Amino acid sequence: MKFRLNDIITIQCIISFLSFEYKVTRKILILTIGILSTFYLIHDKHIFLWKENVSKRLATGEIRNNFNMSPNVHIIDLTAKIQTKFQCIKTKALLNNFSTIICLHQTKKDKYVSGAFQNSTSIWEEDQVTRMLEFLIRHPHLHFIDIGANIGTYTMFVAALGRFVLAIDCFAPNLVRLTRAVQLTNISDRVVLVQNALFTYSGQMLRLSVDTTNIGGQGIVLSGNYSAKYRAANNISTKNPYIVKTITFDEVLPILVAYGIRGALMKIDIEGSESFVVESGNRVFDTLDIPFVQMEWKMVRRYVDRVKIILDFFTRRNYVSMTSSCRLLNPHEHIRWPDEIYWLKRNTSNFC
């Protein structure tokens, strides 16, 4: 087959045109991607700055009125300079990917939690933290509420995953370490720290027990008739870390609303005070999707009245109790339940 000169010229014109079209199309595509990427980065930066501003402005009280925040809720300013000296270490990686920084107590004062981080080869409650990360990976719309955060094992790993964490603890030496860990890992945009004890009445000043070898194992000291004794507000002001101010769980709801949180997993470990969370947290559970709650049972099972409050609350809200291996627990045998239990909302998938 032979081509005439006109045919060859025509073919060359077509090739040149297609080449020109390809170059133009490619430039337009690159330009479009660049514009979209720039817009995304600017938008993402604004989101980051907005969240960072919310955290700081909530802590300093600048926008408390906008969110109807109780004056009793003490939000830690994560930009505050930490004067105290203590050891901070990089942890081992969980799930082959997620590592963080934890700031420790001296092991002789905290043999259980801080002691578990020796040599950076293990962490406190490694199996439980790993399980929580796996749950969050399966459910990317959920965030985390850490009640009894201690020095922040769960908080720091969940934040390393990129989720928002509301961490609550009443003991100042724990929170100063957790604050420093947040600063060192630059995650203040997705963590809010609250320094209060959760209780049935807000604004009370209660005393913590003292354990010289387990500094994170304090519980609030109450009489048997605590509701009557502590109902009247008092205005004690002290820098003693063993005197703590109470709030109800519902009083942290404005924080979650400010951050747009609609669903979360929860860990509750507050040395026998677990019932106060559910007793004062109906609005939180009404507002948020909370499919799973990890709860320490070791201490609270000693109090029959508190156990009844917990059982009634979760049963009424259609949760079942189970072990870490997803074995259902008999509510009538709660005195023999393991030290740690799980509450799972019925008809919830991808947890067991």
Image: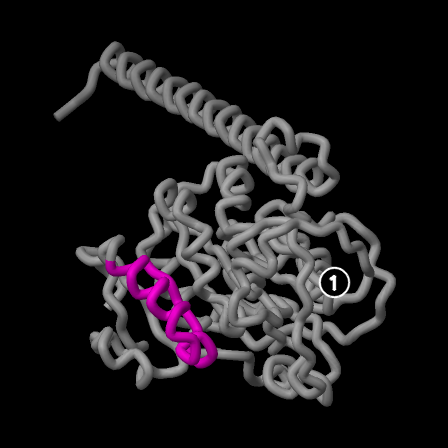
Q: At 25% from the left edge and 10% from the top edge, which residue is drawn? A: 6
332 or 125, which is in the foreground? 332
Q: Quadrant of the C terminus?
A: bottom left
Outermost residue to the top: 6
Q: Total label count?
A: 1
Q: Quadrant of residue 302?
A: bottom left
65 over 148 or under it: above or below: above
315 or 169, which is in the foreground? 315
295 or 223, which is in the foreground? 223
| Percent x, y of residue 332 | 22, 77
Q: Quadrant of the N terminus?
A: top left
Q: At 62% from the left edge and 82% from the top edge, which residue is drawn? A: 117
Q: Can residue 119 be seen in this view?
A: no
130 over 5 or under it: above or below: below
Q: Quadrant of residue 52?
A: top right
Is residue 129 part of the magenta span, yes or no?
no
What residue is pinned by disc 1? 176
Question: Which amino acid does the dot numbered 1 rest on?
Answer: Val
Q: Is residue 65 visible?
A: yes
Q: Quadrant of residue 82?
A: bottom right
Question: Within 10 Å of the Cα at label 1, are there few (<14), some (14-19), or many (20+) other Cα atoms?
Answer: many
| Percent x, y of residue 37 | 51, 31
Q: At 30% from the left edge and 78% from the top edge, which residue is drawn? A: 334
Specify whether 318 is left or right of 212.
left
- Check disc 1 and report its element: helix, strand or loop: helix
| Percent x, y of residue 244 | 69, 61
Residue numbers of the magenta segment: 292-315
